[in-house]
Amino acid sequence: MTNIKQTPLNKAHRALGAKMVDFVGWDMPVQYSGTIPEHLAVRTAAGLFDVSHMGEIEIKGADALKLVQLISCNDASKLSDNQIHYTALMTPKGTFVDDMLVHRFNLEYFFLCVNASNVDKDFDWIVSQSKGLDVDVRNTSDKYFQIAIQGPRSLEILQPLVDIDLSTIKYYWFKEGSFSNIPVLLTRTGYTGEDGFEIYGLPDEAERVWNKILEQGEPLGIIPAGLAARNTLRLEAKMMLYGNDVDDTTTVLEADLGWIVKLAKGDFLGRDILAEQKEKGLSRKIVGFEVLDRVPVRDGYPVFIDGQEVGKVTSGSPSPFLKKNIGLAYLPIDKTAIGTEFSVQVRGRDVAARVIETPFYKRKK
Amino acid sequence: MADYPDNLLYTKDHEWVRVDGTSATVGITHFAQAELGDIVYVELPKVGEKLAQNDSFGSVESVKAVSEIFMPISGAIEKVNEALNDSPEHVNNDPYGEGWMITLKIENPSEIDALMSAAEYEDFLSENRN
C-alpha cells in the first residue's frame, strides 16, 4: 500500500497510545485500552470512535431523488427532510455495490455515507447511473471528519457541548447545529447497536471536537474505542459488514434485509431479480449462529452440513458482551431454521454451531 | 516484575522457556500477550504428545485474532496448564507465572543453546519495532 491515508485525528490517536493498523489503506486505531473494555464501555456507558475514513457522496439537483431511487432499493421518497435510512447501493443483479446511509436534506439534496473501501467505486457507479439526469454528484469524503459517540450515556455527554436539544433528534434523524461554535451535522445513527450520534464537520475542527467529548465524558465513563471493538459491537447487533457479509455476490434478500427492499416504489437497479427471488423463494440466506464450543470461529472458516461444505463464516468472533462465540454465515434455505445445527471447521476440527435468533444483542429501550 | 526476566530464554516467535533440569516450561512473552490483547481462548496439546522444535503446539486467541504458538525446542508434552481453559486471561495478567502453557521433557539439550537471552530478545524486539 503506497501513501497510507490518515484521518485528521491521527495525532490524537497516537497521543492516546492507540495500536494503529492499515485498514483498507487508512492508518486507523484498532484499539486503545483493549477490545473488551472498549466494547463493554459502549454497552454500559459510551465509546468514542474516529470514523473519518468513511466516505461521503453528495447528490444535488432537480433529479436528485430520481437518481437515489434508481440506485437504492429503499424508498427515499418516504423519507422526510432530515431523516436517514439504511439501504443498499444496488447492482443490476440485486446485489450490493455497497451498503450505505442515505440522509435526505431535501428532495434536491441527498447525503450518502458509504464504506471507506468502496468510495471511489461507489462514486464512479453513481455517476455512471446519472446520465441524462439533472444532478451534481460529488465525492466529498475529504471535506468531513466523522466521529461516532456510541452508548447509553452518549446524549448526556454530548448535550452540554451542542446548541441543539438532542432529545429532539429521533433515531435515524439528523440536524445541523453547533458544537462549541463549530458547525456540525449531528445524526442519531451508529454501527454498534446502541443509542448514539455521529458528528460530521470540517477536518480542521476534528481534534477539538474529539478532545472536548473525551474531556466532557470522562466522568461518565467514555473511552476512545477502535476498529476491533466497532467490529464486535456491530456483529452482536447483526449489522452487515461489506466485503464480509454482503458484497456484489449476495442479494439484499439473501442478506435477510427484506425490510430495506421496497419493490412497490417503482423501478430500481436489480428490482427484477429481487422480485423474482421474493416470488420463487431464496435458495440461501444469512443466519446468525452460536458456537457450541469454547473455540472462536473466524471469518472465512468453512461451514459443513452433513459432511458437505456449504459456505464460509462471513463474520465470526468471540462476543465480549454475550461471552460466547458467535458468527454469521449463508446457509441453504432449508437449514436456516432457528435451532438447526451444523459444523464449522477450525484448524481441521469440526466444531458444532447452532442457528439462533438475531440480532444477538438488542438494547433495552 | 521485569518485562523479560533474566532467568528465561526466548524465541523469535515470542515464546519464553524456563529450563528446569530435564524439563522446560513454555509460555508467551509480555510482548506477545500485549500484541494479542485480551486473550479469550488458549488451545493446548495433549499430555504425551511428542513435538519437534518449531511445530505448532497450540493457539492463542484474542477477541480480534488467532495466533499459533510454536515449540521452542523438541520434546514430549508433560503437563498443560488446564487453568487456562477457564481463565485464559492469566496469559495477559501473568505471562511468566499463572499464564504458563506447557511443560515438556527436553529431547535435545543442544537446541537450548540457540535460544535468546533476555537481553538478546529485547534487542531483537527493538530491531523489529521499526
Image (cartoon, coloured by chain):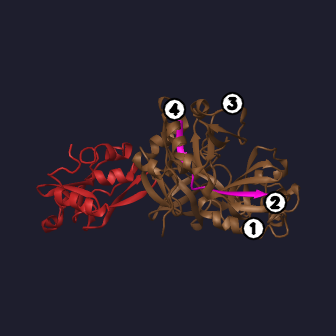
Chain colours: A brown, B red
Secondary structure of residue under mark 1: helix
Give the CA separation, mark 1 to mark 3: 37 Å
For marks 3 and 4, the one nearer the N-term is 3
Give the CA separation, mark 3 to mark 2: 42 Å
Residues behind callouts 1 and 3 on a single chain: yes
Name the residue that disc number 1 marks.
Answer: A127
**Labels 2, 4: front one:** 4
Identify which amino acid the numbered label 3 is placed on.
Asp
Residues behind callouts 2 and 4 on a single chain: yes
For marks 2 and 4, the one nearer the N-term is 4
For marks 3 and 2, the one nearer the N-term is 3
Identify which amino acid the numbered label 1 is placed on.
Val
Left or right of A50, for residue A164: right
Chain at numbered mark 4: A
Name the residue that disc number 3 marks.
Answer: A165
Chain at numbered mark 1: A
Give the CA separation, mark 2 to mark 4: 49 Å
Name the residue that disc number 4 marks.
Answer: A216
Chain at numbered mark 3: A
Residues marked 1 and 3 touching at CB (< 8 Å): no
Give the CA separation, mark 3 to mark 4: 17 Å
Magenta part of the protein: which range? A46-60
For marks 2 and 1, the one nearer the N-term is 1
Residues behind callouts 3 and 2 on a single chain: yes
Left or right of A8, for residue A90: right
Q: Is A179 contained in the magenta span?
A: no
